[in-house]
Amino acid sequence: METIAKLQAKKNKEKITMLTAYAASLAAVFNKTAVDMLLVGDSLGTVFQGQKDTLAVTLDEMIYHATVVRRGAPDKFIVVDLPFMSYQVNPEKSLSNAGKIMKRTGANAVKLEGASELVLESVRRLTAIGIPVVGHLGFTPQSVNGLSGYRVQGKDRAAARKIQAEAKALEKAGAFMLVLEMLPARLAKEITRALKIPTIGIGAGADCDGQVLVCDDMLGLYPRAPRFVKRYAQLDTVISQAADTYITEVKAQKFPGAEHSF
Ligand code: KIV
């Protein structure tokens, strides 16, 4: 299994790969690949639960999905998202909620979004008690309403400077890695160069230290995947063809055959 030390040693040497997972079955498939890390992202709210955004996802749901992903992928370094309002109240609540995730799921780290003073204090307190934290800047899905929708962030100079300062602040607070989402490639490159910790990009160009994609997006299972996604498979077609063949064979009494019967 990867460790924080091994992941950080990849910076400037080897790109880091991360994929999301929400189910034991897919996690077991990823467990057999060379992917460095799995993320139980609160993107499960949109791709798994069919909601319009991630805001309704609960801590119990994250714990449930993280537990089944750990069961499917015993050998992978697993990061779990702290869901909306589980770390935005006060540092004590952040600690207690992150602690529940770590105790109940067997995850290796938690991820939270933004860099407000409250978030920075939570990162300091979590890392001080040994809970590793991944930061998340740029487009932060839990702030979709405040950000007026799914938009590239840091496009003007002032916004870019703010994100650069936030990245430095998260590193100083103790985050061991940073997800950069939907940023201009040049800005993500500058942030990556300015930090000692690795950056993981999603819609942030090729110069981050690694990349993350949402599993359903890259497998072709989610119809509303954003432009920055590359589909490495078209599983929706494979699955509907398999279902059609099954239906046809049952109707034609070709399935089950003698070999499937007792
Ligand atoms: O929830 C998620 O899957 C994420 C990725 C988009 C990085 O945060």
Image (cartoon, rainbow, N blue to C red):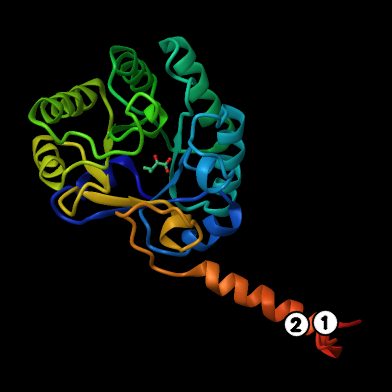
What is the x, y in percent for residue 178?
A: 27, 36
Contact (CB < 8 A) between labels 2 and 1?
yes
In the rendered structure, the answer to whether residue 186 lies left or right of residue 205 reads: left
Return the x and y of residue 246 as percentages of the image width and height: 73, 78
Q: Which residue is drawn at 19% across and 51% down?
A: 205
Q: Which mark is residue 248?
A: 2
Residue that extends furthest to the front in the rendered view of this protein: 148
Image height of 250 relative to 219, above or below: below
Q: Residue at x 22, y 46 (%)?
A: 204
Query: As rendered, which of 73 and 111 lies closer to the eye?
Result: 111
Residue depicted at x 45% and y 34%: 81
Residue labelled with disc 1: 251
Ligand 1, seen in the image, is in the quarter at: top left
Secondary structure, mark 2, is: helix
Disc 2 within 8 angstroms of ligand 1 (CB): no
Residue 112 seen in the current view = no
Q: Establish if 25 lies above or below 122.
A: below
Q: What residue type is labelled 1?
A: Lys
The answer to which of 147 and 169 lies nearer the viewer is 147
Locate residue 180, reporting x and y percent: 26, 39
- The image quadrant where one finds the C terminus is bottom right
- How far is mark 2 from mark 1, CA to CA? 5 Å
Note whether 50 is above or below 132 in the view shown: below
Q: Along the horizontal axis of the image, is 209 left or right of 112?
A: left
Q: Label 2 amino acid?
A: Thr
